[in-house]
Amino acid sequence: MKTAIQEFMKKIELRNGHETEFLQAVYEVAESIVPFAEHNPKYKIHKILERIAEPERVLIFRVPWLNDQGEVEINRGYRVQMNSAIGPYKGGLRFHPSVNLSVLKFLAFEQVFKNSLTGLPMGGGKGGSDFDPKGKSDAEVMKFCQSFMTELYRHVGADIDVPAGDIGVGAREIGFLFGQYKRIKGEFTGVLTGKGPEWGGSLIRPEATGYGVVYFVAEMLKLRNDSLKDKRVIVSGAGNVAQYTIEKCIEMGALVVTVSDSEGYVYDPEGIDAVKLAFIMDLKNQKRGRIKTYAKHFNCTFIEGQKPWSVKCDIAFPNATQNELDEADARLLVENGCFCVAEGANMPSTPGAIHVFEQAKILYAPGKAANAGGVAVSGLEMSQNSLRYSWDREKVNIKLKQIIEQIHQVCVKYGKEESGYINYGRGANIAGFVKVADAMIAQGIV
Ligand code: GLU
């Protein structure tokens, strides 16, 4: 089987040689799907995995804008329209200096499987720019967003491609992007999700990714007659996903002892409570400050330039970014007694790290399953926009929970091994694949 996977990867490498993140994401899926397709030859005959690994369309465009000094700045904009077999392209926009085609192709590829897992009719896409919102004024961010949308508007639409947020793109950016789209097209439609609640956004969308990851962990623990109560938790990141992961963990009685950003991590042995979380939210969302301010304010340790993986815990949530947790980190986590890792970020664990989790037979929830709550509520936002109606918090939250429970169930269905160990990674890949693959076969060679 190893050779079949290698042969498949050789073809992908030939076409995408230097796109390391994209190759990593495809390899992780191929490890589950190539053997699965051997037993289900229709997927092999129709070359479904080869087709899924080739974007339907990639758009790259210039984004010129004027900074506050009146100087011309030029960034590169992208939209990867990966797969539309089960619905319009759907996925976030990332604004970060690390953005390149490889990163966006890996994210778009993951999105195809993730969106399929939600059970909602959404294809997969991703976009963004190497623009760095850090240190930019609101006016500069607005000018950038307007320029970005002035090109993107011709490629997106409520029934075509529906972008949303990701790293560096939150409520502020979605507002500027939506305003420009509406101005150009002269229509008010659900072209973006993550909108403000007053203008077509869904309640619970900001909370959805973080809440969803914790709901997923609660489901994994329930299978073992356990819960999050009194568990010691470490979290990386301090953005939207980390914030609402912490909120839900606190609500479920867990003790969260770390939070981090690109400068380092905070270790708070007494645990982050509601007051401290409110401080983080204000610091990160309003003041756009650095997490070390927390350590100073609450008199605890800040460990500069490091990630929190050496801190003893029961459960770890890598919620920052791709490849933030490597094989050595994974070993340290397992040695220190961590028995559950749930990915709020996309592809935060390296292949070596995943291998360690699987060998140690600990609970490992891959991002495409565990963090699907965000895009799931984006899907619910699309439904509400089509209905020209908005549901209350309770209704959206119940639906979010149901979707996560159903994702957990299909992961168990396809991921359970003879020993009883549940390989959630394989389960998520196969369950996400089957729906898209069957739709592609039904729609012919397009
Ligand atoms: N960027 C998020 C993700 O990685 C959400 C995308 C969306 O809501 O469309 O799934």
Image (tube, helix red, strand yellow):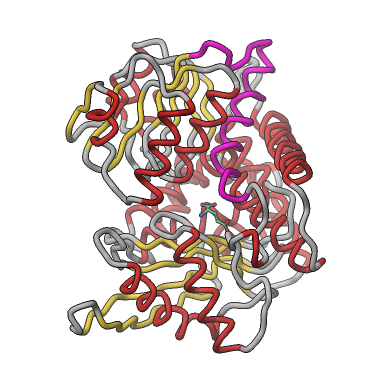
Relative to 83, say whether 156 is above or below: below
Relative to 398, say whether 274 is above or below: above
Which of 399/155 is in front?
A: 399
Q: Kindly report the secondary structure that dominates the magenta region of the rendered protein.
A: helix
Magenta-tinted stretch: 205-231
Q: Is residue 96 left or right of residue 93?
A: left
Q: Position of residue 366 (x, y in %)?
A: 52, 36
Relative to 192, say whether 243 is above or below: above
Q: Is residue 25 left or right of residue 269?
A: right
The answer to whether residue 446 shows anywhere in this view is: no
Which of 15/268 is in front?
A: 268
The picture quadrant where one finds residue 70 is: bottom left
What residue is at 76 percent from the left and 61 percent from the top?
384
Which of 79/23 is in front?
A: 79
What residue is at 35 percent from the left and 68 percent from the top?
138
Relative to 319, say whether 43 is above or below: below
Q: Is residue 329 left or right of residue 351?
A: left
Which of 279/28 is in front?
A: 279
Q: Position of residue 144 (x, y in %)?
A: 35, 76
What residue is at 43 percent from the left and 22 percent from the top?
256
Q: Is residue 170 left or right of residue 391?
A: left
Q: Position of residue 168 (x, y in %)?
A: 38, 58
What residue is at 53 percent from the left and 22 percent from the top?
363
Position of the C terminus, as image quadrant, is: bottom right
The picture quadrant where one finds residue 130 is: bottom left
Q: Write down which quadrant ligand 1 falls in.
A: bottom right
Q: Position of residue 177 (x, y in %)?
A: 49, 74
Q: Please tell me whether residue 358 belongs to the stretch shown in magenta.
A: no
